């Protein structure tokens, strides 16, 4: 089965504005870059993915994605996440995408095993015999969505935003899809608030330092 990953990404200079209390603008920009690179490196290790696509309106984001062997799709302006995903699915399904895996770019603890857990329901006969399949990974509050697998992908199956976990479940039930809920720490812990930042660096010290090399070899 041709499973393609879709990674929507805000411009590096705009993402993680809620971390302003703990990180300066330059540090947030560098953080956003590292988060994207981390997710792309993880996805490259997953054998079940045929293609990786990054969706963004930021040329810098798209350039970094191409440097890490991802394909790119430039969003329109202003960007709307659900609309961008709808348009991407409409474009990519005729090119051969049979299942879509949507992952955000702010999962600092993500591992290949987490991604494989989202893909695992594709091996279940009962899932493939249903009207469709949705595997979903909620955030740790069980309100947001930090991973979404759709087989087959549909343009109007996306409901990202406040309360998206329940909204996605509602849409899947209405379509008669087989539903698999995937609870894993690497998928549950995203990075939005100062409290998230403190938790992440306490559990993975490698994120504690912001002295990361940028693409030109400079460090802060």
Image (spheres, grey):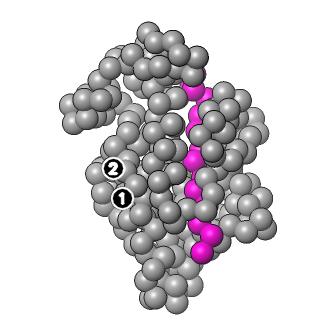
Instruction: State the SS at label 2.
Output: helix
The residue that label 1 is drawn on is: 113
In this rendering, position of residue 190 left or right of residue 26 = left
Give the mark nearer the N terminus: 1 vs 2: 1
In this rendering, position of residue 59 left or right of residue 200 = right
How far across and how far down the image is residue 40, in percent? 52, 44
Residue at x-position 43% and y-position 51%: 146
Is residue 135 shown in magenta? no
Residue 186 badge: 2
The span picked out in magenta is 1-14
Contact between marks 1 and 2 (CB within 8 A): the answer is yes
Tell me how far mark 1 sits from mark 2, CA to CA: 9 Å
Residue at x-position 29% and y-position 24%: 208
How far across and how far down the image is residue 26, in percent? 49, 14
Q: 69 above or below 199?
A: below
The quadrant in which residue 96 appears is bottom right
Q: In the rendered image, which quarter contains the N terminus?
A: bottom right
Foreground label between 1 and 2: 1
Residue at x-position 59% and y-position 66%: 3
Instruction: State the SS at label 1.
Output: helix
Label 1: how many residues lie within 10 Å, few (<14), some (14-19) or many (20+)? Answer: some
Q: 155 above or below 121?
A: above
Q: In the rendered image, which quarter contains the C terminus?
A: top left
Label 2: how many residues lie within 10 Å, few (<14), some (14-19) or many (20+)? Answer: many
The quadrant in which residue 190 appears is top left
Q: Can the viewer see residue 192 in this picture?
A: yes
Residue reaching furthest to the top: 220
């Amino acid at each position: 089965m041709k499973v393609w990953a879709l990674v929507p990404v805000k411009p590096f200079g705009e993402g993680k504005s809620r971390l302003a209390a703990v990180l300066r603008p330059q540090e947030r920009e560098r953080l956003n870059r590292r988060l994207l690179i981390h997710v792309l490196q993880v996805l490259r290790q997953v054998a079940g993915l045929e293609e990786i696509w990054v969706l963004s309106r930021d040329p810098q984001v798209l350039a970094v994605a191409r440097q890490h062997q991802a394909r790119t799709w430039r969003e329109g302006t202003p960007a709307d996440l659900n609309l961008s995903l709808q348009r991407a699915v409409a474009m990519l399904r005729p090119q051969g995408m049979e299942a879509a895996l949507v992952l955000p770019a702010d999962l600092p603890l993500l591992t290949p095993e987490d991604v494989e857990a989202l893909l695992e329901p594709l091996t279940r006969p009962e899932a493939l015999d249903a009207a469709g399949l949705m595997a979903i990974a909620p955030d740790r509050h069980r309100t947001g969505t930090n991973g979404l697998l759709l087989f087959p992908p549909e343009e109007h199956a996306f409901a990202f935003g406040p309360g998206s976990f329940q909204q996605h479940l509602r849409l899947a039930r209405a379509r008669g899809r087989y539903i698999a809920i995937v609870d894993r720490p690497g998928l549950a812990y995203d990075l939005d608030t100062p409290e998230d930042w403190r938790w992440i660096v306490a559990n993975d010290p490698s994120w504690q330092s912001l002295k990361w090399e940028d693409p030109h070899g400079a460090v802060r």
